[in-house]
Structure formats: structure tokens, C-alpha cells
Image: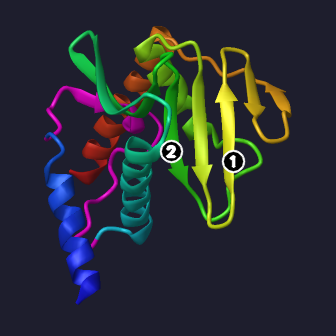
Amino acid sequence: MIKEEIIKAFKKEMKNHPQKQEKTIYVTDLLHCVLRPQKEIPDTWLIRGTAIHTGIQKMLSEYGELKIEFEKTVAKQFGEYVLMGRIDAILEDGTVVEFKTSDNPPMFPYDQHLYQILILHEHNRAKRGILLYLGNNEIREFIINEETITETETGQTFFGQYSVNDEWIKKTNNKIRNKNVNSDVRRM
């Protein structure tokens, strides 16, 4: 009864997202398999993550003290393609924030999350980004600058070799397009 209502509500919310155009690539497409199948019943982790995002946004909007803009869509033209992304939150100083849900937050951010925030960071011309992992019993926050990643609670700093610029985005997009063409040929 309630389970079905949650699934219906989730599907309605997903319908509010704009339809993907043929020459549009989402930031997450650069980092995940773009051929993932659409399921009749969405994965629980997706519903859980959406519910947590909604709750965090509501809580910070109503009770938080920071000035935060939520769910900002950004787009950039790359030849015939448009790269689109949605930033979970942007702080008043321009810091890009991404919320991630995980049973147990990692000790170091996952690569795909680092690249996601770096792409959005580049899109928004931000000076820094924050990855916030919301776990079952723990919240772990990482501040990402151009050359460092710092875990805020411990102060542990990692020196990364992660770099995203227009050239990286173009190369990654070309790899994906070639992979999709090859997959289409195999299916024929």
C-alpha cells in the first residue's frame, strides 16, 4: 500500500525532469553506463537517495543559516552536443555541493563522484566543491579544490591528480559515443 504510493510518487517526480534531447549528454553519462535500462519499479537506492535529497533541501531551506541555491541546472555547448548537469546546491560564495547517499560513507570520495563535482565545478567556475556523503550513522564531508581533497572532520588532506577541463570532457564524450555506436552495431 505505502510502498506502491512511494513508487508512484517517485515516478511522478521523475516525470517533472525535462526529457533528454538527442544531442544532450548528462554529466552522469560521462561517468556511468548510458545504456542502463529503465525499470518499471525503480531501484530502492534511487528512491532513498531522492527522498534524502528532498529532505536535506527542505531542512536547510527552512532551518539552515547558510544562503543556498538548490538544484541549479547548468549546460555547456560542445560542438553539436550540449553537456548538462544539475548541481545539488550552490553556496553563496559559489561553492558547488553534491549530496551522496551511502550505507557507509567512504574514507575517500569515489572517483565518479570526484569527477562529477569537478565537471560541475568547471561548469560553474567555482573555486571549490563539497562532496557530502550521508550514511546510515555518519556524515562525511570532503572539500575539493583544484589540487587537494580534504576530509573536514579529521583535516586529512589528499593531493589528487584529478583534473577536468573542456578537453577531458570532449575526449570522454567521444569515447562514450564510440562505445554506444559499437553496442548498436553488435545488437543488429
Seen at 36% across and 53% down, the residue is: 54
23 part of magenta stretch? yes
Residue with the mark numbered 2: 99
How crowded pointer 1 is (Cα within 10 Å; few <14, some 14-19, many 20+) is rated as many
Q: Earlier in the sequence, mark 2 or mark 1?
A: 2
| Side (left or right) of 110 relative to 164 | right
Helix, strand, or loop for circle 2?
strand
Seen at 20% across and 50% down, the residue is: 188
Pick the residue in front: 51 or 188: 51
**Does 42 sit above or below residue 115?**
below
Please report the bounds of the magenta region as a residue range. 19-41
Residue 50, position as x, y percentages in the image: 37, 57
| Side (left or right) of 18 relative to 46 | left
Q: Quadrant of the N terminus?
A: bottom left
Amino acid type, mark 1: Arg
**Does 36 sit above or below residue 33?**
below
Pick the residue in front: 174 or 156: 156
Q: Quadrant of residue 26?
A: top left
Q: Quadrant of residue 61?
A: top left
Secondary structure, magenta segment, majority class: loop
Residue 19, position as x, y percentages in the image: 13, 41
Asked whether residue 121 is in view, the answer is: yes
Amino acid type, mark 2: Phe
Q: Quadrant of residue 81?
A: top left
Residue with the mark numbered 1: 140
Pick the residue in front: 98 or 113: 98
Helix, strand, or loop for circle 1?
strand
